Amino acid sequence: MPGKKQKSLTMEKGPIWDSATKAQKVDIERISREYIDFISKAKTERMVTADIVKMLEKGGFKHIDKVKSYRAGSRIYVLNRNKNVAAVVLGKDPLEKGANLVAAHSDSPRLDLKQNPLYEDGETKLALFKTHYYGGIKKYQWVNIPLAIHGTVIRADGESVDIHIGEDLDDPVFTIADLLPHLYKKKQADRKLPHGITGEELNVLVASLPFQDKKPKKKVKYWVLEYLNKKYGMIEEDFVSAELEVVPAGPAREIGFDRSMIGGYGQDDRICVFTLARSIRDIKSPRRTSIALIIDKEEIGSDGATSIKSRFLEEVYSRLLELKDSSYPDRLLRMALSNTKAISSDVNGAVNPSFKDVHELTNAARLGWGICITKYTGSGGKFGANDASAEFMGLIRGTFNKAKVPWQTGELGKVDEGGGGTIAKFLAELNMDVVDAGPALISMHSPMEISAKSDVWSAYKAYCAFFMMSP
Ligand code: MN
Ligand code: MN
């Protein structure tokens, strides 16, 4: 615009740490410590949901079943199958004017136990669990590392039993044994990387001692069954009605001499889940209703009743409208959804200095440069992408700038390099404006994903600003 003075003609982005104030550096450290604690403990979607509900209750959120009515500022949460939670801070405007919604996913790539997982190898007399990997993993990364098992078993008597083994220092851990280099030349050395370890080789070592009794044939397998029965009241058939997840054992750690980074499992997308939950807990009296939504099954394509494709979000809106008027017209629900502005809060891939050429570096996210706004994901010519509109990008950028949130933009890799998707396009199906925004990670989907502490803080600030936005 001629005559209008612009701050800077060029877009200059850089590390947050370069321009952070002393007070901001203290905040970065504080929120990162809380986050490290969170991801060290919450290793499954159920555990994430339970921890977030605890955080919400401490922050004054009430389960919707206990709520008779609400007014501006009321704090409510809705739970779905112990795997989804929506936290709501009611705005001054009525819900039909739309909400500011931020949605993240609680599931992370992992190894699930098969329905009939336990077997004893006849030659070696070792007992193992068969697994079926969940989500996009590079399978070779999951061998020879300590693994923990977390999950829920529904026993024949209907009782639900939680199992958590491998996180306490006194606990045993489990592992998947790779082939020794001395003998791998013919069998493994010429395999292509995706098949370096195959799905059926991801067998978890669980026992080697025989059961001290002459009767059972498979003595080591029987030892495990006897142990599980004594400890959890389980029988072998109970595995059929169980969700047992094998995940990297141990806590997340600070990385580097300067402790500026965080390494740990499940940061995609729990870095967003955490910062999102913290921000909705901390905001006060927004003009528009704020909703933090935590969903499941993103890593396997968002199918299933706990995924974003289920109607849980509509259910949340509907229950809120019902609290005002039990016979609200359907039009009101449609308006509320259509007028909602949404962030799909998910991670992007930060440039890895050893593999820079998969990115086009003028449009790639850097670790520690702030929350990454990703206009589109998809692959092969934006196929399968939610391509956010210029208008909505303008609103988001303006909101972050006004709140002095450090941000950057990035694509997921070079054009034609690969790609990926998020839940953004499924939110868009409800006729919402939506864009992806979340921290960028190095080594995404690995047992040791890497984030920057400063990006945790940036995401928190960004979601706070978005919730308070009144377009
Ligand atoms: Mn993700
Ligand atoms: Mn992912």
Image (cartoon, rainbow, N blue to C red):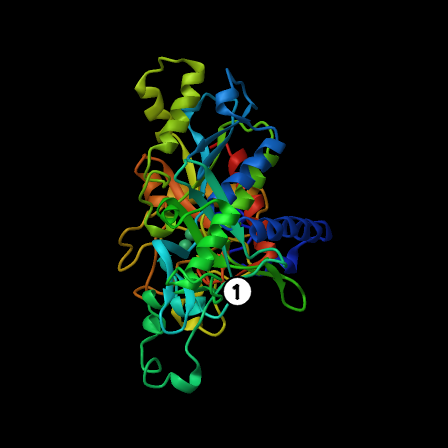
Residue in view at x 52 percent, y 18 percent: 70
Against 24, residue 211 (above or below) is below
| Farthest residue, direction right | 22
Residue 464 in view in this figure:
no
Against 84, residue 264 (above or below) is below
Q: Nearer the viewer, residue 341 or 108?
A: 108
Q: Quadrant of residue 370?
A: bottom right
Residue in view at x 48 percent, y 22 percent: 65
Ligand 2 within 8 A of label 1's CB?
no
Against 356, residue 60 (above or below) is above
Percent coordinates x, y for residue 445 in the rendering:
44, 60
Against 173, residue 301 (above or below) is above
Q: Nearer the viewer, residue 465 or 278?
A: 278
Label 1 sits on residue: 146
| Farthest residue, direction front | 214
Residue in view at x 65 percent, y 52 percent: 33
- Number of labels in the image equals 1
Mark 1 crowdedness (10 Å alpha carbons): few <14, some 14-19, many ≥20: some
Residue in view at x 72 percent, y 49 percent: 23
Left or right of residue 186: residue 465: right
Q: Amino acid at mark 1?
A: Pro
Residue 23 in view in this figure:
yes
Percent coordinates x, y for residue 152 in the rendering:
45, 44
Percent coordinates x, y for residue 342 in the rendering:
42, 38
Label 1: which secondary element: loop
Q: Nearer the viewer, residue 75 or 447?
A: 447
Percent coordinates x, y for residue 286 in the rendering:
55, 29
